[in-house]
Image (cartoon, rainbow, N blue to C red):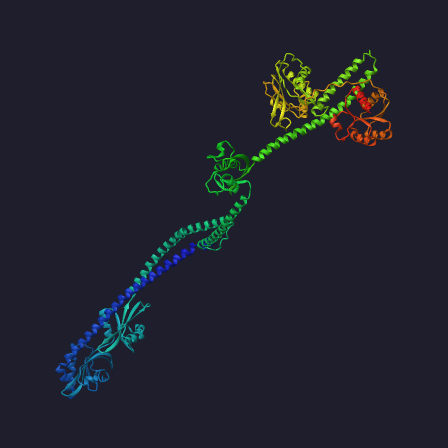
């Protein structure tokens, strides 16, 4: 607590107030005391002067009395006569008696007669004391000379005021009559009795008369007597020990100056002063208490704003500097407040300097930022929370406003949408609202309108700008014109979908081709061995029917592999000019109607329908698949089937949605097959042309997939449109044929020729097929050389090349495949005849065999008669 008080401003304030009040009181006390003293002194001076005046008056009165007595004596002839008589006769008795009588009526201390030498001859009232000389007193000589003299002088018996008159008779001088008032203690006491004030008279040599006792006369200062006499001034001194006031003043008695000393009793004055001191002390204590209390109140009154100023200064310093300020230790409130205020001023000045620097940097930064964002090709706009545009770059300005500089206030919906309300109220997602709500970046696509009113698609990336509290105060929108990109993305999307579909189809095609190849190899063994068995059986054998069933089943399986190969866009492909109308009726007859025998078929076939360049068998397969679907869909409802054909001339270039590729402009044949069945759901429509996708319990899901593959291979397009309950519509477009050639007539197979025992080399990696071909050729009287691999076949051919007339080669074999084996054999023996026997289609099989293809191609599975006929034709040509 003491330490706190020592550091507090209260102590110096109270001390200062105490000092000021004490000093004021002391000054007041001194002034009051001095004034009182001065007043009392003035009173005493006045009293002394009054006494002085009384003394002066008494002296004048005494002198006047003395003069009166002198005139009386001078005119007293009897006295003169008695005195002269004495000097003449020497008889003193009459003189004594007369002088004693006269003395009784005189108010004088001295009454004597001297001879002309100044020797006292008689002194009244003191007859025994005579003979002393007065010749030395001042004025004696003048008096002997005949003058009346009144003078203050020192005589044989001390100082006195004397009146001298001569004793002259005629011209003869006898002596002098002297009257006088003694200046002695009685003289002073007489004045004391009148004034009740002690007085003393002094000369340069000391005190000559005093009303004071002898022991008290030593308090008089002889120096003041001398100064008073020499300077002719009045001096006052104070004897505090004896509580007296002493006045030293010159006073003149006739012709002599004396130092008048008036001694005044100051006890009443000191009593008044003591009482005044007590009263002042009481007042001082009261005032001191009031001052202390006032000091405390004043201190509290001063400290509160000082502390508030100090605390506010610390707060400002901490706010602007970010650190706790260093406080001055051992200081009071004013010092700490001044220290804090100075630090605050320094901090503010530093902060102002930093603000100026920061402002300059901000301006430079803004210019730099503006130049940076102006260099960005995308539109950049900074938007406040109230939709007002705060900043935008040159790209945004040129797009929305043109060349004039940006002058606010403008709002984002005015700049971007040329609207008078926010885009959120217009039904679009507002980036500003979304960012304010989520405090997260958002990306939206808007349609913006440029200065000319043209609309473009923009991708807007809006990001929040936060304040120090984490609240979103602005957003920055980066907008990129994506109109062309969307067009490209749409095209890319379609291309990607097409590529994905093609990749998917290619995968399935590869799978389908591989399955078909393996099936064909297996079927080749089944069908061939069944034929051999049938040829070995007697005509009336009951097992003939078994072999026929095996062969028929194998042929049905072969048809299935044809569908797979058709979907895979492979298989036997022999295009020619085909008239669709004739194939429609043929396909209707071959289509499986099941329980839909009562379905009404309505034709609308164009009479002048152009031919198409296509494989007739594959076209039939397409039509049969579509008719089968229609009949199966309506087998419970017995609806109607509509078949329409027409020419579409000068059709513009268009894109086939299923195949995802462009079709050139030109003339097309349009085939539409529609039914009144239950329709197809949207989910099924997307997958209806996928292989192995079917809604039928016994279906294989290859019919429509194979149809789509065939149509695509013929550079056409197939599509379907359907809704549940409204039936289905299939549309096929095939390019018109430029050649009008009749459909080829079936060839007649001659099987009556006999082989000439030539040697045939067989190469196949399937042992069953190798054995089958060996048996077939052996029955045809050919010599057979067999090889399970291409490498083995090449070694045999090198050894037996001169004997081998014909080689039947599989394509897919371990080691050297059929294509490379064919090339090696032709290199060894260019005249060698080669038949390619494989499960693949001809195009796939002979691809890459160069400008000189093999002499024949036969696709597995095939009948032995077909192989015999091909061998016959090749060797016959040879």
Picture layout, residue 61 above or below residue 511 = below
Q: Nearer the viewer, residue 14 or 649?
A: 649
Identify the image quadrant of the C terminus: top right
Q: Nearer the viewer, residue 874 or 380?
A: 874
Q: Nearer the viewer, residue 779 or 255?
A: 779
Picture layout, residue 544 above or below residue 224 = above
The residue sitting at the top extreme is 540
Q: Locate residue 738 relative to residue 424 in the image: left or right.
A: right
Q: Locate residue 16 relative to residue 406 in the image: left or right.
A: left
Q: Locate residue 324 relative to residue 193 in the image: left or right.
A: right
Where is residue 301? Give x, y as percent: 40, 51
Where is residue 711? Give x, y as percent: 67, 24
Picture layout, residue 102 above or below residue 498 = below
Which residue is drawn at the image coordinates 69% and 27% (left, top)? Answer: 508
Figure disc tally:
0
Where is residue 519? Give x, y as percent: 75, 23
């Amino acid at each position: 607590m003491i330490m706190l008080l020592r550091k507090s401003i209260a102590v110096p304030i109270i001390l200062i107030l105490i000092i000021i009040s004490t000093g004021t009181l002391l000054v007041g006390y001194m002034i009051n005391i001095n004034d009182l003293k001065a007043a009392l002194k003035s009173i005493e001076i006045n009293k002394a002067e009054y006494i002085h005046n009384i003394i002066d008056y008494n002296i004048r009165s005494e002198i006047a009395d003395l003069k009166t007595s002198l005139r009386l004596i001078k005119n007293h002839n009897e006295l003169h006569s008695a005195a002269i008589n004495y000097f003449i006769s020497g008889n003193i008795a009459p003189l004594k008696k007369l002088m004693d009588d006269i003395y009784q009526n005189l108010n004088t201390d001295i009454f004597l007669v001297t001879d002309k030498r100044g020797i006292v001859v008689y002194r009244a009232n003191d007859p025994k004391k005579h003979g002393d000389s007065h010749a030395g007193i001042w004025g004696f000589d003048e008096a002997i000379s005949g003058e009346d003299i009144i003078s203050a002088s020192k005589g044989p018996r001390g100082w006195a005021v004397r009146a001298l008159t001569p004793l002259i008779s005629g011209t003869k001088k006898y002596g002098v009559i002297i009257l006088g008032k003694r200046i002695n203690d009685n003289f002073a006491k007489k004045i004391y009795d009148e004034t009740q004030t002690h007085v003393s008279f002094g000369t340069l040599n000391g005190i000559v008369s005093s009303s004071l006792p002898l022991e008290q006369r030593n308090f008089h200062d002889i120096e003041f007597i001398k100064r008073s006499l020499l300077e002719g001034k009045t001096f006052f001194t104070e004897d505090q020990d004896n509580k007296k006031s002493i006045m030293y003043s010159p006073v003149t008695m006739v012709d002599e100056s004396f130092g008048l000393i008036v001694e005044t009793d100051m006890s009443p004055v000191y009593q008044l002063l003591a009482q005044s001191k007590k009263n002042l002390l009481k007042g001082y204590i009261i005032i001191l208490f009031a001052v202390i209390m006032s000091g405390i109140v004043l201190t509290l009154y001063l400290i509160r704003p000082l502390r508030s100023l100090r605390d506010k200064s610390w707060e400002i310093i901490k706010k602007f500097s970010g650190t706790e300020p260093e406080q001055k230790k051992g200081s009071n409130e004013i010092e700490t407040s001044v220290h804090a205020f100075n630090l605050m001023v320094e901090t503010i000045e530093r902060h102002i300097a930093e603000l100026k620097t920061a402002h300059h940097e901000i301006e430079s930064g803004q210019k730099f930022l503006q130049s940076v964002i102006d260099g960005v090709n995308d539109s950049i706009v900074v938007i406040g929370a109230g939709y007002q545009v705060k900043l935008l770059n040159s790209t945004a300005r040129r797009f929305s406003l043109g060349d004039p500089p940006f002058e606010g206030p403008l709002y984002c919906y005015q700049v971007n949408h040329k609207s008078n309300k926010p885009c959120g109220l217009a039904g679009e997602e507002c980036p500003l609202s979304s960012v304010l709500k989520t405090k997260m970046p958002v990306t939206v696509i808007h349609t913006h309108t440029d200065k000319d009113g043209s609309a473009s698609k923009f991708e807007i990336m809006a990001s929040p700008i936060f304040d120090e509290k984490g609240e979103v105060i602005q957003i920055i929108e980066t907008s990129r014109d994506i109109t062309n990109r969307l067009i490209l993305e749409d095209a890319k999307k379609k291309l990607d979908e097409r590529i994905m579909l093609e990749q998917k189809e290619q995968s399935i095609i590869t799978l389908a081709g591989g399955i078909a190849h393996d099936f064909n190899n297996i079927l080749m063994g089944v069908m061939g061995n069944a034929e051999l068995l049938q040829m070995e059986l007697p005509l009336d054998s009951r097992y003939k029917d078994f072999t026929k069933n095996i062969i028929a089943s194998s042929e049905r399986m072969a048809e299935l592999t044809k569908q797979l190969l058709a979907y895979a866009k492979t298989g036997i492909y022999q295009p020619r000019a085909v008239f669709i109308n004739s194939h429609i009726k043929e396909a209707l007859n071959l289509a499986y109607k099941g329980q839909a025998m009562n379905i009404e078929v309505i034709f609308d076939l164009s009479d002048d329908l152009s031919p198409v360049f296509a494989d007739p068998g594959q076209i039939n397969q397409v039509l049969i698949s579509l008719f089968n679907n229609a009949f199966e869909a309506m087998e419970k409802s017995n609806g109607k089937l509509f078949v329409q054909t027409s020419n579409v001339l000068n059709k513009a270039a268009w894109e086939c949605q299923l195949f995802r590729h462009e079709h050139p402009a030109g003339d097309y044949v349009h085939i539409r097959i529609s039914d009144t069945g239950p329709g197809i759901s949207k989910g099924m429509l997307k997958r209806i042309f996928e292989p192995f996708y079917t809604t039928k319990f016994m279906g294989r899901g290859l019919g429509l997939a194979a149809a789509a593959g065939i149509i695509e291979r013929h550079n056409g397009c197939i599509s379907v449109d359907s809704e549940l309950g409204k039936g289905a519509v299939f549309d096929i477009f095939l390019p018109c044929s430029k050649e009008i050639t009749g459909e080829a007539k079936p060839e007649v197979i001659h099987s009556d020729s006999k082989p000439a025992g030539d040697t045939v080399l067989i190469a196949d990696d399937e042992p069953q097929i190798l054995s089958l071909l060996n048996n077939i050729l052996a029955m045809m009287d050919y010599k057979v050389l067999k090889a399970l691999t291409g490498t083995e076949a090449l070694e045999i051919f090198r050894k037996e090349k001169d004997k081998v007339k014909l080689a039947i080669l599989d394509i897919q074999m371990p080691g050297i495949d059929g294509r490379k084996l064919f090339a090696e054999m032709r290199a060894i023996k260019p005249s060698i005849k080669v038949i390619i026997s494989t499960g693949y289609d001809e195009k796939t099989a002979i691809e890459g065999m160069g400008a000189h293809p093999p002499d024949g191609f036969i696709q597995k599975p095939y009948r032995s008669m077909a192989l015999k006929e091909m061998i016959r034709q090749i060797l016959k040509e040879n």
